[in-house]
Amino acid sequence: MKKIAKLALVAVAFSAAAFAKDYRVEKPEAWKAKTVESAIKALYGDVKPVDSADVKVSTPEVASNGGQVPVSIKVGVPAKSVALFQDANPESLVAVWNIEDNMVPNLALKIKMKKTGSITVVVEGKDGKFYKAKRSFEVALSGCEG
């Protein structure tokens, strides 16, 4: 029985990977964009994401280590994709996730921020609308709070 469960897990993992988009190949200019606005345009086109309470992004008020800033994202609308942008480093686009049916887009990761700035999350809804949330925070110099 364990062998069947392992095979099923491999099949599910393979099928999800087979349908994943490679945004670095499909949208290379988005990864080179120097501003959040130009990265959003390169990724999604001429869209105007609206601020939404259904998109929540969390970071510490002060990140003591700019090399490992914890970020969590919770999305309360049916989503097709979620993208994370920042304005402190040379290239703005950090990550893009495809959200498949039955997936709950609650995401967590650590990013690098070389200085104080903000992060923006854009959600492409299944309804064709675009939603966003923005969070500003401080990055302590030399990894020290003070």
Image (spheres, helix red, strand yellow):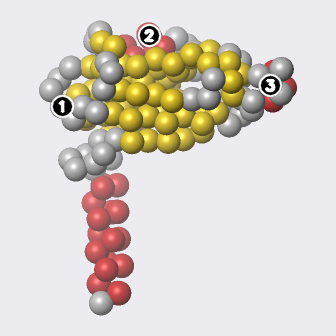
User: SS class of the residue under badge 2?
Assistant: helix
Mark 3 or 1, nearer chain start: 1
Q: Label 3 to label 1, Cα distance in Å?
A: 41 Å
Q: Residue 98's quadrant in the figure? A: top left
Q: Residue furthest bottom?
A: 1
Q: Residue 28's quadrant in the figure? A: top left
Mark 2 or 1, nearer chain start: 2
The answer to which of 86 and 64 lies nearer the viewer is 64
Q: Label 2 to label 1, Cα distance in Å?
A: 22 Å
Within 10 Å of disc 2 (Cα), the crowding (few <14, some 14-19, many 20+) is some
Where's residue 88, x and y in %? Answer: 63, 17
Name the residue at 33% across, 71% down.
9
Which amino acid type corresponds to the residue marked 2 in the rendered image?
Glu
The answer to which of 136 and 80 lies nearer the viewer is 136
Where's residue 120, x and y in %? Answer: 46, 20
Q: Label 3 to label 2, Cα distance in Å?
A: 30 Å
Where's residue 1, x and y in %? Answer: 30, 90
Q: Is residue 138 left or right of residue 145?
A: left
Query: Circle 3 is placed at which residue position?
Result: 145
Which amino acid type corresponds to the residue marked 1 in the rendered image?
Lys
Query: Circle 1 is placed at which residue position?
Result: 126
Name the residue at 64% across, 33% down.
69
Look at discs 2 and 1 and give the one toward the viewer: 1
Query: Circle 2 is placed at which residue position?
Result: 37
